[in-house]
Image (cartoon, helix red, strand yellow):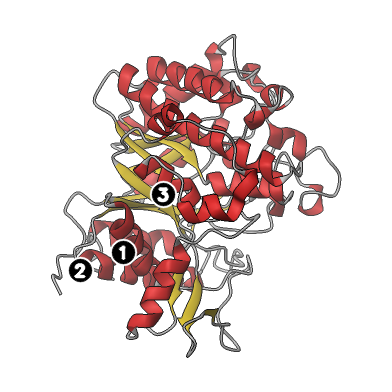
Amino acid sequence: MINKGFCKDFKWGVATAAYQIEGAPNEDGKGLSIWDMKCKRPGVIFENQVGDIACDHYHKYKEDIKIMHDLGIRNYRMSISWTRILPKGTGSVNQKGLQFYNNLIDELLKNNIEPFVTIFHWDYPQSLFEKGGWLNSESSNWFADYTKILMDSFSDKVKSWITLNEPQCFIHWGHNSTEHAPGIKLACPEVLLAAHNVLLSHGKAVQTIRSYSKQPATIGYAPVGELSVPFDEQRDKDIEVAKKETFSVKPLNCYNSSWWIDPVIFGKYPQEGLDAYGFAVPNFNDNDMKIISQPIDYLGLNIYFAKQVSMDDTGKTIEIPREPGHWFTPMGWPTEPKSLYWGPKFFQQRYNKPIMITENGTAIIDCVSQDKKIHDPQRVEYLRRYLTQLKKAANEGIDVRGYFLWSLMDNFEWAYGFSKRFGIVYTDFTTQQRIIKDSGYWYKNVIETNGKSL
């Protein structure tokens, strides 16, 4: 074992998304997103809750940045609301929206916190959705034009950019299943056409950043790190099938890794996917793939859990169910710490790119205790187990550059409303009071020691 630990400039950070924390959906000229509209439909969000106020970060960003500063956080993965910049998605620019993000970025830099700006984290402009959204052949140009405005406005101060967050989720859960916005079910050929336009949007955004950034930029991409792990880590056959299953593509299912990452890194769709999807694959040409595969600096992975698989006596891959009493989080997800070992290992072996864990964390049933504090030992234990596995990957020479904990604060958890708390900072959604949880102070120590305390 190399036992090198985390690199000395490892990026320890936290992550949020604009719609989940900002609130102020109609303030200062902001336009409506598909999530604003989704929340207006009765019965689709937990207890009909809405993100109109969320964490009121739009007004309380200075307080939230001070909390980050006090916790020793030096890297903040945030997203920009497209419709706060362009109320209609294209056309007239909202100067007050630009000013908000300039003020936010300035406050971060004043506190020695580097912004990692995600250009799109699910809150698609409603006006563009009404024009066909990701099905419209112009959608990638809309995204490039939006990216150009961000470069003109912020790239003198922001050097770290992430194009898209979890395209598997906003396409699958928004258009195949319907739990997420816009909640419109499409046929498989339409789903894959939307996916292709999303990938083109990524590529054109990379081109735009490279062409117009006012300083050398670092560019990442943050898909779900959908993966399987070996049931028996000492058994070569289990490792073999886990790696194969991690990059497999199943018919009529766009929720996978390789369909979304192979084009970005290799400039081609995986053959297994072309075979699995067959007639549903959209028309594309070599120029499309050249655009999609513009070089990126690292591969981001959002990893929370994994399937465990094994090879049976006939050579078949089988999923191994969890043992009775296994620790599942309140999201219904099985805890799987070794996903932060095998994930970086498998993805770096396949794609030969530095790895950034752009999201990882857990919902816990948190409450304010009698001493007015939030004691969340389960979250601390979850993070300790996962980060220990990530450290193992780093020890073995896997090029892991950073870790962004989801999330800075409890927020609007999409279709779950306010029922799931992921934060290391507690949010009282009635009073908007913030309270740092035990896990926040624990994470501060991890950051200060660069993981040596694990």
Residue 170's tag is none
Q: Can you see residue 56?
A: no
Q: Provide the residue designation for mark 3.
A: 14
Q: Residue at x 74, y 48 (%)?
A: 178
First along the sequence among labels 3 and 2: 3
Q: Residue at x 53, y 41 (%)?
A: 17
Q: Is residue 116 above or below residue 86?
A: below
Instruction: Compare marks 2 and 1 and give the one earlier in the sequence.
Output: 1
Can you identify the residue that label 2 sits on? 396
Q: Is residue 155 visible?
A: yes
Q: What crowding class fits label 1: few (fewer than 14 Cα within 10 Å), some (14-19), or many (20 or more)?
A: many
- Contact between marks 2 and 1 (CB within 8 A): the answer is yes
- Closer-to-camera residue (55/41): 41
The type of residue carrying mark 3 is Val
Give the residue type that dot 1 points to: Lys
In the rendered image, residue 219, in percent from the top left (x then y), is placed at: 33, 35
What residue type is disc 2 on? Glu
